[in-house]
Every structure is written in C-alpha cells, then in structure tokens.
Image (tube, grey):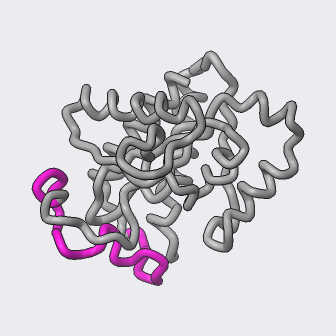
Amino acid sequence: GPGINDNGTGTSALLSLAQKFSSENFESTNRIRFAFWGAEELGLIGSTHYVENASQSELNKILANLNFDMLGAPNYVRFIYDGDGSDGPEAGPTGSDVIEEMFEDHFRVNELPFSSTSFDGRSDYGPFIAVGIPAGGLFSGAEGVKTTDEKLIFEGESGIEYDKCYHLECDSRENVNDKGFEEMYAAVVSVTKLM
C-alpha cells in the first residue's frame, strides 16, 4: 500500500541491517538500538515521545542517532544530512559533522556522487538534535524538484520531483528505485558498522 518509499524503504533497510548483523554475529563497539518511530508526519510524535520520556542518564548513553528516511525515491539523489552546516544555515550538534563525513567517505570510496540536504529537524532525528545528540543519515528526496545540475550528476529527470508520489497513493512498490535504494543501503551498512 501507500507509504513504500516514505518510509517503507527506511524501515526495510533497518530490518535488513538487523538480520545482516545477526547472521554475521557482528559485534559493534557500541550497542545499536533499532528504532521505528510512529506518526512522523503528524509532528514527529513517536521520536519526540521517546526523547521527552527518556531520563537524562538514558539520553547521555546515546552516541548518535542515524536517520534513514526515504531511501528509494524514483528520481533520487544521494543526499546526506548536512551535519556540519557547510551547505545551509543549520548544523547539528557536535559530532554530526563526523557522521556526515563518514557517509561522504563511503560514497567517495565507491565513486558515487552525493549531495547534502538541509539539517532542519524535519525528520525523526529532530528531537535528538534538539537535546544535543549528534545525528546524521541519508535521504533520497521528496517533493523537491531535481535540478539540471543534479540530473547531470545523478541521472534521472530534471524539472520533476525526486518522488512524484510523495504522500500520495501511488507511493507503492513500483515507486521505489531499486538501484538507488541498494546504493543507499550499502552506505547504511558501512557507516553503522563503524559506529
């Protein structure tokens, strides 16, 4: 049903990552918590509830929040949240710049171009950065329109939305760009393993 790119792709990436780590008996330096928030579209209700109801001691244990929202837009760009604020007015809490750099390094090593996206608290990382927890992540685009320059770098079609089915019933399985999703998922795996 509707909601496959937004945010079935992020959900499936996390589920697949959890299965991968389990099957590989992967041991992280830090504990990894897989979280699935509800009611993001209604005002970040799930993630806000979590942050507001966690004790300061619990919040102090969070090294970082990684956010993966809409990873398979059909007219995608490999967007990384602008944690250092170099491409926009908002920077994340200290450490967000390091997360951004880790994603950039992954894409550089794999010779895949990337771009930054505003770090404005629009997705479920918002409540975490509001209390000073470093955050970062990936996004493939929503209602924004792909530019001619982005078409030259990322292919696709200029002059149309990254996801013309954003918040519409046509956000079905057919709305996901599998190639783009796989590229983003590989970055999810790579960076999460480094945390």
Please give left or right for residue 130 compared with residue 150 in the image.
Answer: right
Q: Is residue 117 above or below residue 189?
A: below
What is the magenta segment's predominant secondary structure?
loop
Residue beneath the point at 10% across and 56% down: 152
User: Where does the image place residue 79, in percent across and percent down from the top left?
Assistant: 35, 50
Q: Residue at x 48, y 43 (%)?
A: 137
- Looking at the rendered image, the quarter that the C terminus falls into is top right
Residue 162 part of the magenta segment: yes
Q: Which quadrant would residue 27 be assigned to in this image?
A: top right
Please give the name of the residue rendered at 66% of the width and 37% of the height, measured from the top-left corner. Answer: 133
Marker count (numbered): 0
Q: Is residue 7 left or right of residue 47?
A: left
Q: Nearer the viewer, residue 84 or 144?
A: 84
Image quadrant where residue 55 sits: top right
- Residue located 50% across and 55% down the image: 69
> As rendered, which of 19 and 117 lies closer to the eye?
117
| In the image, farthest residue toward the left | 152
Q: Which residues are magenta?
A: 151-173
Picture coordinates of residue 48, whole percent (x, y): 75, 57
Please state the horizontal and vertical placement of residue 31, each as a whole percent of the image: 69, 25
Find out whether residue 153 is within the magenta segment. yes
Where residue 94 appears, as percent x and y from the top left, is 58, 31
Tell me if residue 155 comes above or below residue 114 in the rendering. below
| Extreme residue in the front direction | 89
Q: Quadrant of residue 37?
A: bottom right
